Image (tube, grey):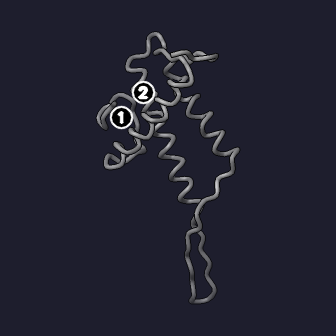
Amino acid sequence: MPDYTFYTDSYLGEDIPEAEFPRYARRAGVKLGRLRQLYAMTPRPGVPDAEDNALCAIADAMYEFDQEDARRGYAAASVGSVSETYVAPPELCPTTLYLREVYYRQLAQDFLQIYRGVRHG
């Protein structure tokens, strides 16, 4: 699994804070592992550290989606000197969740060749 130095120096990531990177890297590793269960995958020729780069790309997307979800829940209202701010949990529709899964697979394909079809053993 790549470390934060790989994320910033090799992948050139700049969005995920260092303290949060291990959690997002683990989540992305689980996602990449799930993709490996569904598809045969090999590194793209000529792409160094393909799996680590794919993991960083997925981690970046997860972080950005989490930031977007957090912003979506905030609401504020002001009337005169009274103001209220509250958070409503984001409700993600099945289409949004599906499109995010497709996006993760597309990110992995930037670095890995993914063979579709039936995966055996």
Q: Residue furthest bottom?
A: 81
Secondary structure, mark 2, is helix
Residue 102: x %, y % from top left: 62, 33
The three-letter amino acid code for the residue at tag 2 is: Asn
> Residue drawn at (51%, 31%), measured in percent from left and top?
34
Q: Amino acid at mark 1?
A: Tyr
Q: Residue at x 70, y 44 (%)?
A: 95
Q: Secondary structure at mark 1?
A: helix
Q: Is residue 63 left or right of residue 2?
A: right
Q: Is residue 111 above or below residue 4?
A: above
Q: Earlier in the sequence, mark 2 or mark 1?
A: 1
User: Split into 4 quadrants, where in the image is the N terminus?
Assistant: top left
Q: Residues within 10 Å of mark 1 (few under 14, many from 20)?
A: many
Kindly identify which residue carries mark 2.
Answer: 53
- Note whether 77 is above or below 25 in the view shown: below
Q: Quadrant of residue 116?
A: top right
Residue at far top of view:
45
Q: Which mark is residue 7?
A: 1
Decide which of 27, 18 is in the foreground and name it: 27
Q: Front-most of 111 and 42? A: 42
Q: Position of residue 13 (x, y in %)?
A: 40, 37
In the image, residue 90 lies at what x, y percent?
60, 59
Vertical relation: 18 (above or below) 33: below
In the image, is 60 to the left or to the right of 8? right
Residue 107, disc = none
How far apart are the alpha carbons under marks 2 and 1? 8 Å
Quadrant for residue 50, please give it: top left
